[in-house]
Amino acid sequence: MFLKKIAITGAVAGLMGSAAFAEGHGAMCGPEGQSIRILASDFPAIHAVVDQGEANCGTAASEFARNHTTEARQIMNAALTPNPAEYTSVILANSTLTQLMNDDLVRPLNDLVEKYSDNVKPNQLITIGGDVMAVAFMANAQHLFVRQDILEQAGVTKVPETYDELLAAAEAIRAAGIMEHPLVMNMQVGWNIGESFNLVFLAHGGEFFKPGTAEPTVNSEAGVAALETLKKLVEYAHPDYLTQASNETQGLWEAGQAALGIMWGSRGAAILDDEGSTPEVTGNTVLAKAPSVEPGGIPGATLWWDGITISRNVSDEEAEATFAALVSGMTPEMVAANNDDAVWLLDGFTPGPAAAGVAATAQGGAKPYPMIPQIGIMHNALGNELVDFLKGAESAEQALADVEAAYTTAAKEAGFLQ
């Protein structure tokens, strides 16, 4: 099975280093007359990179097409399986790279990185088993958002740093009659609920697998503690929290219907800008480090990168043209025009208020999202099996036993377990 054992360098903590783009470079667009077809998620930072790549190199291509969709994760494997693949590149993140590599659908980039070395720097390279498999351009994490004015109104004198402080702040806001449901989290059934568990599980020191194996270890003391913490948190969330992902939580925040949130840093710029909200909300929103279990402990977060990959099942000419166009978009000028849309891993980035939460979370020692081939199976099992616990239909121990059983079945089918 491809990727049974995986070694990665260039983890996100290392990516948070210095500038990553050569000054004074010119756009190099690779072979002319090629088809460039991009599949990507739909948020501003990715649009900015692709837009700049098209501006630089779109006229040299026979076509420059893009599909920005919230369904990218669900469709990418099927889209890259035919030969030729439907897309020449997928812009993705930690977990989805392993999803594609497990099916051998993306190509090593070593030669292209060497050829276009003026446009790519070492701290951007995601290297697995000696091969560069992706080029990262931004970092991301979920962390704490707070409304300082509402905390002060409720008598809370400092930004919460631990889960206990977060719960105490939520109770103070409720007790003061300010908001009955002051907390928002991305807890939509499926991937989001699995990721919310991951955040709290890692903060409790949890390990997903027995070291060096694919054997699950989430049904543990840390797993139970994580679920109990999650259950306490959602008691302060909106009643329909199991339907809410990033668009919904951002909407509640901008509408002034939340005072505490665990949301993606990449939503920070949109929340802090002057569109879709009010000065009262934007002027009092602060982005802070993800909460930990104990003061100074591991932040409840997973560090992520977003970056480009190139499809295996396309011609070498299309591969090179696509790579060249996309890395040509990673310019200081692009960053300057879109500075607050991301924590950029590129030259020209000036961290502002929108980047504060991701930066503080990374500096606090948050762990990168695990880049091991079976993590997607575990994540799916968590997303599917924890709902009954949150609804009060079963114990934490039973829910985690269900997770391990579902994971084990799927991992055997995939060849990770005997």
Image: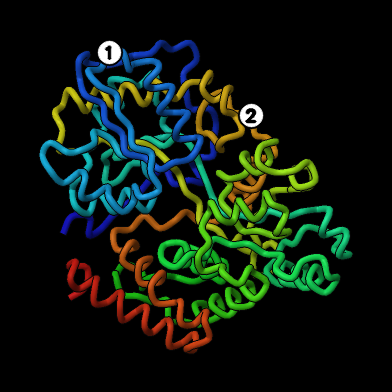
**Where residue 335 sits in the image (x, y, percent)?**
54, 25
Which residue is label 2 attached to?
Answer: 350
Residue at the image position 20 percent from the left and 50 percent from the top: 78
Q: Amino acid at mark 1?
A: Ala
Residue at the image position 44 percent from the left and 56 percent from the top: 369
Res 331 visible: yes
Residue at the image position 33 percent from the left and 61 percent from the top: 376
Q: Foreground: 152 or 278? A: 278
Q: Kindly report the distance in space between the C-alpha atoms of the residues bearing marks 1 and 2.
A: 32 Å
The image quadrant of residue 130 is top left
Q: Amino acid at mark 2?
A: Thr
The image quadrant of residue 142 is bottom right
**Where residue 207 sits in the image (x, y, percent)?**
44, 70
Q: For the residue carrying disc 1, how many other residues have a C-alpha within 10 Å: few (<14), some (14-19), or many (20+)?
A: some
Res 365 visible: no
**Left or right: residue 252 compared with residue 284:** left
**Where residue 189 sits in the image (x, y, percent)?**
44, 68
Residue at the image position 33 percent from the left and 16 percent from the top: 57
**Left or right: residue 342 compared with residue 179:** left
Question: Which disc, if any, is residue 60?
Answer: 1
Question: Which disc, if any, is residue 180?
Answer: none
Q: For the residue carrying disc 2, how many other residues have a C-alpha within 10 Å: few (<14), some (14-19), or many (20+)?
A: few
Q: Foreground: 152 or 358? A: 152
Q: Is residue 123 above or below residue 359?
A: above
Q: Foreground: 235 or 119? A: 235
Q: Is residue 93 above or below residue 300?
A: above
Name which of mark 1 and mark 2 comes first in the sequence: 1
**Where residue 305 sits in the image (x, y, percent)?**
45, 44
Say which quadrant the C terminus sits in: bottom left
Q: Is residue 370 above or below residue 27?
A: below
Element under disc 1: helix
